[in-house]
Amino acid sequence: MPGKIKLMIEKILSERSKGNELVEKIIRTKLILKGIDPARYTESSDDDPVIIGKLEKMMQDLPR
Amino acid sequence: MSISIASSGEATVEQAVQDLFGAFSSVSIEMLVYFASTRFDPEEISARMHAAFPGAAVFGCSTAGEIVSGSLLKGSVVAMAFDRESMLDVKVDVVTNLKRKINLSESFRSFEQHFGEAANEMKPSQYLGIILIDGMCGVEEKVMDAIGDKTNVIFIGGSAADDLRFRKTHVYANGRSYSDAAVLALLKPAATFDLVKTQSVREMGAELVVTKANEGKREIIEFNNKPASIAYAEALGVPVHELAACFPSHPLGLVIDGEPYIRSPTHISGDSVLFQCSSVKGMPLSLLELTNLIDDTRDALERSKARLGGISGVIVFNCAHRALELEYKKLTRAYGELFADVPTIGFNSYGEQCIGHMNQTATMIVFR
C-alpha cells in the first residue's frame, strides 16, 4: 500500500504535538535528523521498509 | 532564588573541591553541575564533589578547557549551583555500556517514577534535559535519537572531552566516574529558560547528497554517486590532496528551517570521508564556510536575553573546534568577555547536543 509512510508521519506529528506548533517543529526536526524528511513523502510514495521500521520504533513511544 | 558560580585552579582535587565548597557555603544547593579538566583524577573528583555537597544532585564531566563568566580557562574546575528556589526538582540517571546497546528504558522509567508523569506527556516548556556523554563513544547521535523517541522534552548538552588527548573522557554522577556512558539529568527549573544553538557558518550554495554511507563508522562513502572525497573536493573547487586542509573552515551541514546541524569531517580514508557525526543515505548536506564567531555568539545571546527579558545564568557547551579557532584567531579573550556580565559556566566539548548531535556548535541553556 503506497503512502503508508506519509500516514505514519502524520499520526506521529499529530499525536505527539497535540496541536502545539513548537512541539510539531521539534518532531519534524527529529524526523529529518533520522533521515526522514516529512515534506518528501506523499500518498503515492513507496513503502520503504527501512523508513517504516524507524517510524514504527517512534510510534512505540507515542502517548497512550 | 539564586544561581551561583565558582571556579578553582588549585593544584589538587582536594584543594579545588574545598575552594568550591567555600564558595557555595551559603547556598542551600538542590543541583550542582561541574566541568573539570582531566588534570584532576576522574574518580577522585567525582567522589569528593559528591561527598562535599550531600543532598544535592551533583553531576559533571571532563573537558578540553573550561568556561566561567568572562574567561576561558585550562586545567580548572568550574561549577554552577542552583538553590531550591531556582531548581524545583531534578533527577539524575546514568546510562552505561553505550557502545554495546543503547537502552534508555530504565532511565526514563526512573524519571517517570520521580516526577509522576509519563515521559511522552512531559511539556518541553516545564522540563529540561541535560546530557553529558562520553566524547569518545561515537554513538551520541544514536543516544539523542533514542531520547527523542521517548519524550518531547529537549535534551541539550555536550560530549565530555580530555584536554585534546582523545584517549578517554569521563562523565560524573553518584560520586563515580564513568566512560562509555551518558549522564542524563531531567530538570524542572523554577524560572523560564531558553535553549540556544549557535554556529558560525553560512551556506556556500553547493549541496552534497549522501548516496552511500556507513552510519556506524560515521563514514560517507559517496556523495552524489561519486567517491565522497572527490565530490567534496569538486564542490570546494580544490584538488583532493588539499581537501583535508579545508575541513576546519568548510564543514558540511544538514540545514533544517535555515538552521545548520554541522557535521565536521575528520579525515579521508581511501575515497571516503570520516566525520564526527553520522549522516544517513539520502541526506542533503550543504557546503559551509565560517563566519564571525564573536559577532554570531553575541547576537545569539542578545536574542535569548530579549526573549527572556533577562538572564540569571548560562551553561555553555562549546565545541573544542571553536575554542581552537578562537585561539588561532586570538579571540579567546573576546569570547570570554561575551559572558562577563552573566553567571556562566561551560566547557569545550567533543560534540554538542540539542535535539540531535552536532559539531562546531555552541549549545547553551539560558536561565531567566
Image (cartoon, rainbow, N blue to C red):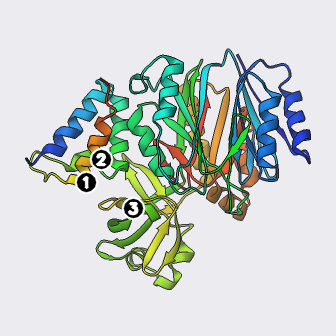
Seen in the picture, residue B29 relative to B337 is either above or below; the reply is above
Q: Is the residue marked by circle 3 packed among few (<14), some (14-19), or many (20+) residues within 10 Å?
A: many
| Type of amino acid at the residue the image marks with label 1 | Val
| Type of amino acid at the residue the image marks with label 3 | Ser
Q: Where residue A34 sits: x, y (%)?
A: 35, 50
Tags 2 and 1 both on a single chain: yes
Front-lying residue, B54 or A2: B54
Mark 2 or 3, which is nearer the eye? 2
Please, what secondary structure does the residue beneath circle 2 have?
Answer: helix
Q: Where residue B325 sits: x, y (%)?
A: 65, 61
Front-lying residue, B257 or B175: B175
Q: Name the residue under label 2.
A: A54
Q: Mark 3 points at which residue?
A: B286
Q: Name the residue under label 1.
A: A50
Residue B20 is labelled as: none
Answer yes or no: do the residues labelled 2 and 1 have beta carbons within 8 Å?
yes
Seen in the picture, residue B213 relative to B88 is either above or below; the reply is below
| Type of amino acid at the residue the image marks with label 2 | Lys
- Asked if one can make out residue B135 in the rendered structure from this viewpoint, the answer is yes
Q: In which quarter of the image is the C terminus of chain B?
A: top right
Q: Distance between the residues labelled 2 and 1?
A: 7 Å
Q: Mark 1 lies on which chain?
A: A
Residue at 82% x, 47% y is B76
Query: In screen coordinates, is B40 left or right of B365?
Result: right
Q: Distance between the residues labelled 2 and 3?
A: 24 Å
Q: Distance between the residues labelled 1 and 3?
A: 24 Å
